Each structure stands twice: as structure tokens, then as C-alpha cells.
Amino acid sequence: DQQVKQNSPSLSVQEGRISILNCDYTNSMFDYFLWYKKYPAEGPTFLISISSIKDKNEDGRFTVFLNKSAKHLSLHIVPSQPGDSAVYFCAATTDGGATNKLIFGTGTLLAVQP
Amino acid sequence: NAGVMQNPRHLVRRRGQEARLRCSPVKGHSHVYWYRQLPEEGLKFMVYLQKENIIDESGMPKERFSAEFPKEGPSILRIQQVVRGDSAAYFCASSPGAVPGGYTFGSGTRLTVV
């Protein structure tokens, strides 16, 4: 029962262009969402999060959009840089972020071509 | 400032042996989490501990797996009588409190059961 789904296993983008990573969820109780970035042989690193009371959160080159009615969120990276090449995981949780159990998607491998 | 330290980085065990994975949280962090990543899958929550207490072990297999976070020393994830299906990357994370975005992950222990 995959409650958080990332249907694109991989994505290739040219340097300088926009990268859009997508995530769908099925559990309507999720009310806090996070994106993590992971390089090979390292642990995930927190990137950006969004509460369900918002539909957009921005931090530098990274913007997360949330569409609650569609149970869909996306991460936009612009402009994309070669150093952004990594696996990106979407995660969700309940209780407004106070819970400590994250439900992760399966990840999307982003390759940014120079 | 050391991050979350996990050791060993790689662990090979024969079927039936015991595996002990260690996690030293960020200094000052009193919350520890263990996640497992099976091949081609996302990270799956296993257990959440505070010093000397298991808070949520809903993701732990019912048999052979145990975790502790003693008053002194690292957190230990113990797998008894390992089987090939236990082969995975095991990640530990820590936080100063109940803030998912405040997780700091370690680099993981890759367990291979032969």
C-alpha cells in the first residue's frame, strides 16, 4: 500500500532549465509534506517543506506546490544545476508535522546535463 | 559539529548471524529514528526512540528486530538470525524534538546477508 507515489523513476534536464518533480498521495490525513535530496552513499538531506494550509512555499531556487484537491505536489528547481543531480524523495506526515513518522515515496533520479 | 554517525558503513553477515547497527545522534539531539531502504524502494519508517524509551515501533518487524537508545552511548538496531530479505540500507536520523523537517540523517549502514 504505497501512500506516497513518485511515478517517474528518473528525469533528465538541461542545465539552466526548470526541473519539475512530481508526487501523488492517497491518504487525505497527510497535512505536512517534505522533499529530501539524496546523493549516492549519503543519507537524505532535507530540502523544503509545505503545510497543507498553504499551496506554495519557496526557498531560493526551490519551490514546492501543493494541490490538495488533486492530492498532488511538485518540486520545481529553477535554474537547474549539475550539482542538483541526485535522487529526490517526497515524504508526508500527519498532525501538522508534529508526528515523527515520515512516509516516503520511492524517489526520482534527477540528472542535470551540463 | 559532527552529524549523525552510523557504523559500520558496510556490514556483511551470513544467514542466521546477528547484525548490530550503531547510531550516534547529533550532539544534543534526544530523538532518534531508524528507517530502512530496500532495493528500488523508498525509505520505510521502523522505529522512533527517545533516551531509554521506545516511542513508536509500528514499523518494526515483529520478530528478530529490536532497537534501543540507552541513557549513555549510541542507539543500536539489532537484527537476530538475519535472512537474505534483511539486506538493505539502514538509515538513522536524529532531531532535537518533534520536527520532521529537523531530521538529520546519517549516511547509513548497508547490510548484505549472504
Image (spheres, coloured by chain):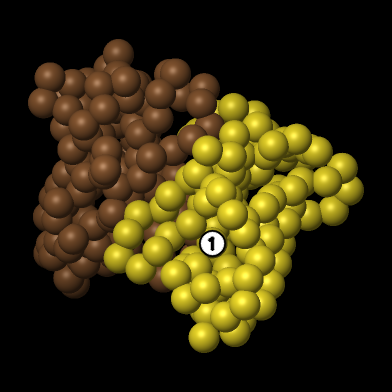
Q: Horizontal placement of A31 versus B21: left or right?
A: left
Q: Can residue A35 be seen in this view?
A: no
* Quarter location, residue B99: top right
Seen from this angle, which residue lies furthest top? Answer: A53
* Residue found at x 56% / y 49%: B62
- Quadrant of the snapshot with the C terminus of chain A: bottom left
Q: Horizontal placement of A81 versus B58: left or right?
A: left
Q: Is residue B56 visible?
A: yes
Q: Horizontal placement of B22 versus A32: left or right?
A: right
- What secondary structure is marked by label 1? strand
Residue A22 in the image, given as x and y percentages of width and height: 17, 44
Vertical placement of B83 versus A53: above or below? below
Q: Horizontal placement of A12 versus B28: left or right?
A: left
* Residue found at x 13% / y 65%: A12
* Residue found at x 18% / y 38%: A24
> In this structure image, what is the colour of chain B?
yellow
Residue A31 in the image, given as x and y percentages of width and height: 34, 21
Residue in the foreground of this view, choosing between B69 and A90: B69
Seen from this angle, which residue lies furthest right? Answer: B72
Residue in the foreground of this view, choosing between B109 and A61: B109
Vertical placement of A98 versus A77: above or below? above
Q: What residue type is labelled 1?
A: Tyr
* Residue found at x 69% / y 37%: B54
Query: Disc 1 designates what residue?
Result: B90
Residue B69 in the image, given as x and y percentages of width and height: 76, 46
Residue in the foreground of this view, choosing between A59 and A102: A102
Residue A32 in the image, given as x and y percentages of width and height: 36, 26
Q: The brown chain is which one?
A: A
- Quadrant of the snapshot with the N terminus of chain A: top left
| Chain of the residue under the numbered disc 1 shown in the image | B
